[in-house]
Image (tube, rainbow, N blue to C red):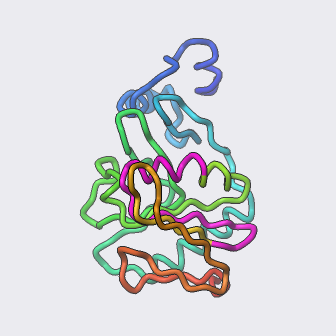
Amino acid sequence: MTVFQNIRKGLIPARLTVDEVYALTEAGVFAENEPMELIDGEIVPMAAAKANWHAMMEAKLTRAIVLALPDQVWLYPSPSITLAVDLLLEPDLVVLPKASMIRDMRGPDLLLAIEVADSSLGYDLRVKAPLYAQHGIRDYWVVDAVRKTIRVHRAPVDGTYTDVEEYEAHDEVAALLLPGVTIRLDTLD
């Protein structure tokens, strides 16, 4: 029985905290890699498998970013990021200081958060962007794997990004908090 079937049958509370999600995972109620996020205490199912466009773009970005990063930071693929007691999101890629413990990271600690979108573009822009802004993530990118664009969100104020720009595949995009880290989608292997 999946976690979502258990919720529908009333076996798991309708609202949870991040700590309860971790406890239920440790107890084996949730699978270790259950495709879900926690938003306002509610479990939101995510796609179990990533489409080809998504997976290919994520792999290309991972390679390019890892090669460009300074030694004192790490790139984490699909980490669970706790932004509030009842908010656990899983961006596709996150850059953090090397000495950091991923479970202890909060919004302002993230140096770069990236969502790769194909079918999830609207969700990443309308649902996740305000959540990331509200919790102080200073550099949030939504990479459209189909159109090959990057929408860069910066300068969060009161739950809204005040600086949002879209870049085409031929444009060079520089990470705000990572000097020397730039991406051009049309040059990715």
Residue sitting farthest toward the top: 10
Q: Quadrant of residue 187?
A: bottom right
187 up-or-down from 109: above or below: below
Number of marks drawn: 0
- Which span of residues is magenta-colored? 126-149
Residue sitting farthest toward the left: 99
- Residue 127 painted magenta: yes
- Residue 165 as seen in the image, left or right of residue 101: right
Where in the figure is residue 75, as x and y percent of width and height?
42, 67
- Residue 44 painted magenta: no
Where in the figure is residue 106, as x and y percent of width and height?
32, 51
Q: Quadrant of residue 18?
A: top left
Q: Quadrant of residue 172?
A: bottom right
- Residue 156 as seen in the image, left or right of residue 149: left
Residue sitting at x 66%, y 73% = 149
Residue sitting at x 33%, y 47% = 103
83 up-or-down from 118: above or below: above
Residue sitting at x 46%, y 29% = 41
Residue sitting at x 67%, y 63% = 55
Where in the figure is residue 32, as x and y percent of width and height?
49, 39
- Between residue 105 and residue 27, name the one nearer to us: 105
Quarter of the picture holding the C terminus: bottom right
- Between residue 32 and residue 111, name the one nearer to us: 111
- Between residue 81 and residue 130, name the one nearer to us: 130
- Between residue 27 and residue 20, name the one nearer to us: 20
60 up-or-down from 138: above or below: below
Where in the figure is residue 72, as x and y percent of width and height?
28, 75
Quarter of the picture holding the N terminus: top right
